[in-house]
Image (cartoon, rainbow, N blue to C red):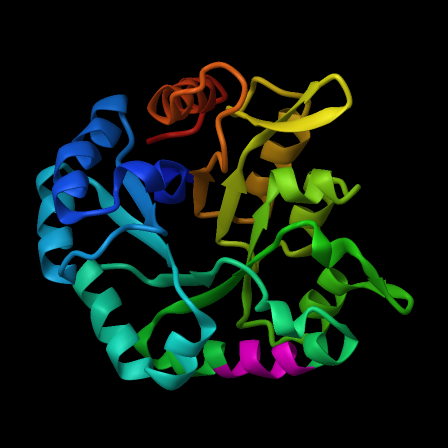
Amino acid sequence: MARIAAQLYTLRDYLKTEEDIRANLPRVAEIGYRAVQLSAVGPIDAGDLRELCDSLELEICATHIGIEDILERTEQTVATHRTYGCRHIAIGGLPGNLRNPEGYATFVGMANEAAVKLAPAGMVFSYHNHSFELEKIGERTALATLIEDTDVRVGFEIDTYWIQHGGGDPAEWITKVAGRCPLLHYKDMQMIGSSQKFAPVGQGNLNWERINTAAIHGGAEWIIVEQDSCEVPPTDPFEALAVSFANLRAMGFDA
């Protein structure tokens, strides 16, 4: 059964310095989370961060880093993630200069290379989507191209909000990458008038019953809560993470 984690990008404004991290990471554990994904966290020694997380009983389940770190600084990347005790390494999105037909083809090769470089260390490379990948390039969406043309060792981190934002069905896309989707970004979409807003899981319009079924059948390891912004109540990101956590626990997921 997939476990719940918090994506620390949600708290980026509260984790800018080592002092911030030491002051605010305990608040994540106090909510009940037992795992985090590192993203947009300020500078802190990897060993010190692992020690802090261990003291809070927080597992580092995944990270977001740049593709160049994996391809050009492989040994350093592997060593850092061994320090973290983390095997899942993802990138937050496609570099802007590659968001064109030729770029997607180029990135397929880069993703394959990243997966091959990390595999000997027992680590998994995953790609996190936004909504721009649902643009059609010829007969296929760009996301379909990435899924169908990459090696099966390339994982995907499907983001439920961004799939919905792009006009897709999150459950359908999770099913498309069954067995290749160890990480899922769970975030809800709430409508305010005609505007789409990020919302805590269970507080918006996404069909969580179908999404959860697809996640379980697809073999997801981590349900990672992320909220890019908190424009609808609760507007405090810690409170938003707490609402998502409570709702996911009510859905039957374990911390």
Residue 35 visible? The answer is yes
Q: Position of residue 148 (x, y in %)?
A: 72, 69
Q: Is residue 214 one of those drawn in magenta?
A: no
User: Going 53% across and 36% down the picture, which residue do you hit?
Assistant: 186
Location of the C terminus (image quadrant): top left
Give the answer, above or below, for where 93 lies relative to 12. below
**Is 200 on the left or on the right of 242, as rendered?**
right
Q: Quadrant of residue 5?
A: top left
**Is 168 on the left or on the right of 186, as rendered?**
right
User: Going 8% across and 40% down the picture, which residue do you hit?
Assistant: 55
The total of numbered circles placed on residues is 0
Return the residue nearer the eye: 127 or 228: 228
Q: Quadrant of residue 253?
A: top left
Q: Main secondary structure of the magenta part?
A: helix
Q: Is residue 110 one of those drawn in magenta?
A: yes
Return the residue nearer the eye: 231 or 56: 231
Give the answer, above or below, for where 179 lies relative to 115. above
User: Going 90% across and 69% down the picture, which residue do you hit?
Assistant: 138
Q: Position of residue 235 (x, y in %)?
A: 44, 19
Q: Position of residue 126 (x, y in %)?
A: 50, 63
User: Going 66% across and 82% down the picture, which residue do you hit?
Assistant: 106
Q: What segment carries the magenta color?
A: 106-113
Residue 1 visible? The answer is no
Q: Quadrant of residue 100?
A: bottom right
Location of the N terminus (image quadrant): top left
Give the answer, above or below, for where 116 lies relative to 161. below
Q: Position of residue 103 (x, y in %)?
A: 69, 77
Give the answer, above or below, for where 180 lies relative to 252. below
Q: Residue furthest right?
A: 139
